[in-house]
Image: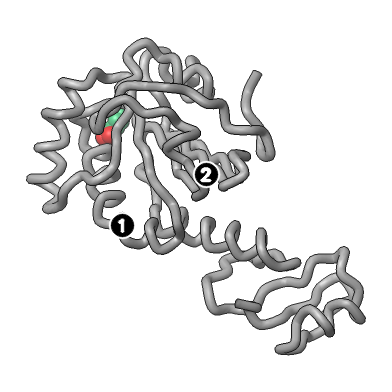
């Protein structure tokens, strides 16, 4: 059965480029991005993992760890990491799971046989401190991911977990947010001391509360 938002992210233990990893222990009290790529020694994946390495500080600011996965083995990962470091001018600073037996790929439905029956697609799972899946995105092998978008979504997830708000289309941190429909105007006035604008009864905007 495929995973859905709100499900507990299945736990697993797997070999990785940084040693054996238990997923729930790795998650700890923070957030995790688990993302798969089709294969080592491929061009788009090389740019993706180099980009994630460069964004480490941005993920850390958000109390978020990252962990990559492909069905290649450890030796392949270790050799490829050297190439990523060299070509992307960075140092890979997060674990890459060696899922040769496809245990994790199958658990997370990362192999889409009608796209490719051997390799994982570009899946992204964001998991919160409660171990629940907060976001699932799937990209095809031919499209490298936009990791700025991923940081933006994590900002939205963390903001909306704390306040009774949602973030509108194309929202960026610092911009106005939408007040959750369940909050009436009286409660909104107390909850959002910066004030709010009623565009329609169902569309109320307030400055970002944090
Ligand atoms: C790549 O990472 O460049 C790639 C991998 C599989 C298929 C197409 C591109």
Q: Residue at x 52, y 44 (%)?
A: 126
Q: Is residue 94 above or below residue 15?
A: below
Q: Is residue 88 left or right of residue 104?
A: left
Tag 2 near tag 1, CB within 8 Å: no
Q: Which mark is residue 11?
A: none
What is the quadrant of the C terminus in the image?
bottom right
Q: Is residue 11 above or below residue 153?
A: above
Q: Residue at x 38, y 58 (%)?
A: 60
Distance of mark 2 from mark 1, alpha carbons?
A: 16 Å
Q: Residue at x 45, y 43 (%)?
A: 33
Residue at label 1? 55
Query: Residue 178 lies in what quarter of the image?
Result: bottom right
Q: Which mark is residue 126?
A: 2
- Mark 2 and ligand 1: say if the CB distance to the nearest ligand atom is below 8 Å: no
Q: Is residue 206 left or right of residue 138?
A: right
**First in sequence: mark 2 vs mark 1:** 1
Q: Is residue 126 above or below residue 79?
A: below
Give the SS element for disc 2.
strand
Give the SS element for disc 1.
loop
């Amino acid at each position: 059965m495929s995973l859905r938002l709100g499900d507990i992210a299945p736990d697993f233990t797997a070999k990785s480029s940084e040693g054996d990893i238990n997923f729930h222990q790795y998650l700890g009290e923070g957030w995790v991005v688990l993302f798969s790529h089709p294969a080592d020694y491929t061009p788009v994946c090389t740019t993706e993992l180099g980009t994630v390495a460069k964004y480490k500080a941005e993920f850390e600011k958000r109390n978020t760890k990252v962990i990559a996965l492909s069905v290649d083995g450890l030796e392949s990962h270790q050799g490829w990491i050297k190439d990523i470091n060299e070509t992307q001018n960075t140092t890979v600073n997060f674990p890459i799971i060696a899922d040769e037996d496809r245990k994790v790929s199958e658990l997370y439905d990362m192999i889409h046989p009608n796209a490719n029956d051997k390799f994982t697609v570009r899946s992204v799972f964001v998991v919160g401190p409660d171990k629940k899946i907060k976001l699932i995105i799937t990209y095809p092998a031919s499209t490298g991911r936009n990791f700025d978008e991923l940081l933006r979504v994590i900002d939205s997830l963390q903001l909306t977990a704390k306040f009774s708000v949602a973030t509108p289309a194309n929202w960026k941190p610092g911009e106005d947010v939408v007040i959750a429909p369940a909050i009436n105007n009286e409660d909104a006035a107390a909850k959002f001391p910066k004030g709010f604008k009623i565009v329609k009864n169902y569309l109320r905007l307030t400055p970002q509360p944090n």
